[in-house]
Image: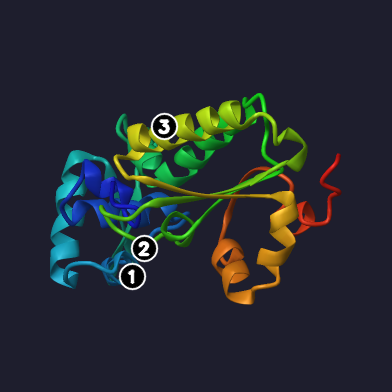
Amino acid sequence: MDLARPISTVVPSLDGPVLLVLAAAEEGLSGRQIHKLAGSGSVAGVRLVLQRLAATGLVHGDDFGNSLLYRLNRKHLLAPIVEQLANLRSTLTAHLAAEISSWHIPPVHAGLYGAVARGDGDLDSDVDVLLIRPDHHAADDTLWTAQVSHLMQTVVDLTGNAAHVFELSQSELAAHLADAPILNDWTDPALHLTGLPLTEAARVPAAL
């Protein structure tokens, strides 16, 4: 899956970026505004897409002075599908959070960073997961490893992308957080999945 534009998996044409913009917009937008936000194609190409989508009823074009303002027709049968495609990153986050929350050994912190968190990347980008393991479950290596392995397969099943899991214990976390570049990679930006925020996880006594 293209991590920057997941909708391209099923809508590889210019229609995809245009629909993404319309799904996120609360008000009507001109063709030039949509072209600027979509960051793809030409103004003329975007207008052709809008005209085609308007002919299907999925998009409405409203007269506003000397221009047309386009908006997604949210009553259309396909509108919920467009909105779901536009929110695939949130859907992925929810699926992974639900799986990790069901673990017998829950992590102190779990989050996504890298391409998914930034909203960029491409078909070849990994889904980067950060896991902070509680120290007091050190004897349960087999169960923990099984959980992580299942999560990695879940990522592949959901996206087609490989999972890159970076895991460390609470006792190892403080030293890593002292390294500002690593901290920036993990937190700016990041998508929290479950457990404590990363900076709080470092302050929790490992024995708890």
Total marks in image: 3
**Which of the marked residues, 1 or 3, is nearer the chain's N terminus?**
1
Residue type at tag 3: Thr
Looking at the rendered structure, the secondary structure element under dot 2 is loop
Q: Residues within 10 Å of mark 1 (few under 14, many from 20)?
A: some
- Residue 5, image x and y in percent? 31, 54
Looking at the rendered structure, the secondary structure element under dot 3 is helix
**Which of the marked residues, 2 or 3, is nearer the chain's N terminus?**
2
Residue type at tag 2: Leu
Q: Is 59 situated above or below 18?
A: above
Question: In the image, 15: left or right of 133?
Answer: left
Q: CA distance from mark 1 to mark 3?
A: 37 Å
Numbered tag placed on residue 33 in the rendering: 1
- Asked whether 26 or 81 is in front, the reply is 81
**Residue at the spot of label 3:** 154
Residue type at tag 1: Gln
Question: Image quarter for residue 203?
Answer: bottom right
Numbered tag placed on residue 29 in the rendering: 2
Question: Contact, CB < 8 Å: mark 1 with mark 2?
Answer: yes
Question: In the image, 117: left or right of 100?
Answer: left
Q: Residue at x 36, y 63 (%)?
A: 29
Q: Residue at x 46, y 29 (%)?
A: 150
Q: CA distance from mark 2 to mark 3?
A: 38 Å
- Asked whether 56 or 25 is in front, the reply is 25
- Residue 53, image x and y in percent? 20, 47
- Residue 148, image x and y in percent? 51, 35
Q: CA distance from mark 1 to mark 2?
A: 6 Å
